[in-house]
Image: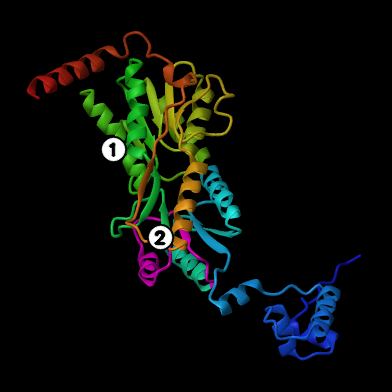
Amino acid sequence: MRNTPTRRPTMRDVADRAGVSFKTVSRVVNEEGSVSPDLVERVGAAIRDLGYRPDGRARHLRQGASTGAIGFILVDVANPFFSSILRGIEEVARGHDTLVLAGSTDGLTDRQDQLVDAFVSRRVDGLIVVPSGSSVGALKTELERGTPIVFLDLEPEELVVDLVRSDHLGGARMATQHLLDHGHSDIAFIGDDPTIFSAGCRLDGFLAAMDAAGIDVPPHRIITGRHSSDTWRTIVADHLGAPNPPTAIFTAQNFITVGATHALHDLGLHQRIAQVGFDDIELADIVEPAITVVPQQPRELGRRAAEQLFRRIGGERDEPIRDIVESPIIVRGSGEIRPPSGRSGSNAATGRTRAARARSRG
């Protein structure tokens, strides 16, 4: 049997069913209190019979009250990192009886501006935004108009605003130092496009740790770009399959870690080349060896961003916050593989010599 869609009942339908005027129905729905009990009962019965649902958003707008919704603008809902952030936001929003409307930009600034306009036109009470690049045109306009906005993950250069993000630089430095502490000096950095704020910070953290150890990083050991997990699988396999591969890799994004893990297993190098990832990934503790990671805490990031947004919605006017969320390294096995005998000697010795000279100059 085919289900034929029917039109949603309107207040005009309710008025016809109850035998009253449209204005009477409007007064009953908006609880204006100037309608007799008999008419309230008749309108209520018609509403129940028809299954009419009042437009709560329209009522809120007429009354100048909260619309009971906030917007979340993210880069890619398919990425588990952003999905987990959304879960954290929703946990806080439920406590405020608020819905979360979400939209993906796919990294496009034009799409970001479209979503900002779409959410604002629906009168959301505020926005949580993972910006796509450095363009903040529409967001800056809305901030000037008084729309509460909390930035998440990316720090805008042009604006002093509420920000919640991970410690990208510190986490990357920690991951690299972990590999150095386990005897590696020939470490490849495999990361996202460094023009992305978080990716650039992670590359800076890697280079800072290597520089502090007195180790020069050859340009071919830095591999960056925007690719899928499958593409990264091929890229990493090509790099590790070449003569003189690195003894360790730092995979600085979750999709990259997935692709690199496949590549290591494809080549049979998963027990020989050490790996530390930035971001945790599903099943990271199931593969052999399990993957050592510096995890972000996406649900916590989402919760903190939502809590700050609701403080702003509630009227808080303090100076903008800058909440940097740190994470300890999770040691599982892949990052503790030591380099083969003879592979760490020359570079490590050079690194120790440079570090010693730097200390003596200091």
Task: In the rendered structure, find residue 176 and report the number of the disc placed on it.
Answer: none
Q: Is residue 146 magenta?
A: yes
Residue 272 versus residue 305 in the image, above or below: above
Task: Please report the residue visible at 44 percent of the width from the left and 53 percent of the height from the top.
Answer: 308
Residue 22 versus residue 141 in the image, above or below: below
Residue 232 versus residue 60 in the image, above or below: above
Q: Quadrant of residue 351?
A: top left
Instruction: Give the residue at mark 2.
Output: 316
Asked whether the residues under the numbered discs 1 and 2 touch, taking CB atoms below 8 Å apart as contact, a structural biologist would say no
Instruction: Tell me if 317 is positioned left or right of 218 in this view.
Output: right
Q: Amino acid at mark 1?
A: Asp
The foreground one among 176 and 325 is 325
Q: Is residue 315 magenta?
A: no
Task: In the rendered structure, find residue 204 and report the number of the disc placed on it.
Answer: 1
Element assignment for label 1: helix
The mark closer to the camera, 1 or 2, is 2
Determine the residue located farthest toward the bottom in the rendered image.
Answer: 21
Q: Specify whether residue 259 is in view.
A: yes
Q: Position of residue 169 (x, y in %)?
A: 32, 37
Q: Amino acid at mark 2?
A: Glu
Q: Which residues are magenta?
A: 122-148
Q: Position of residue 207 (x, y in %)?
A: 27, 33
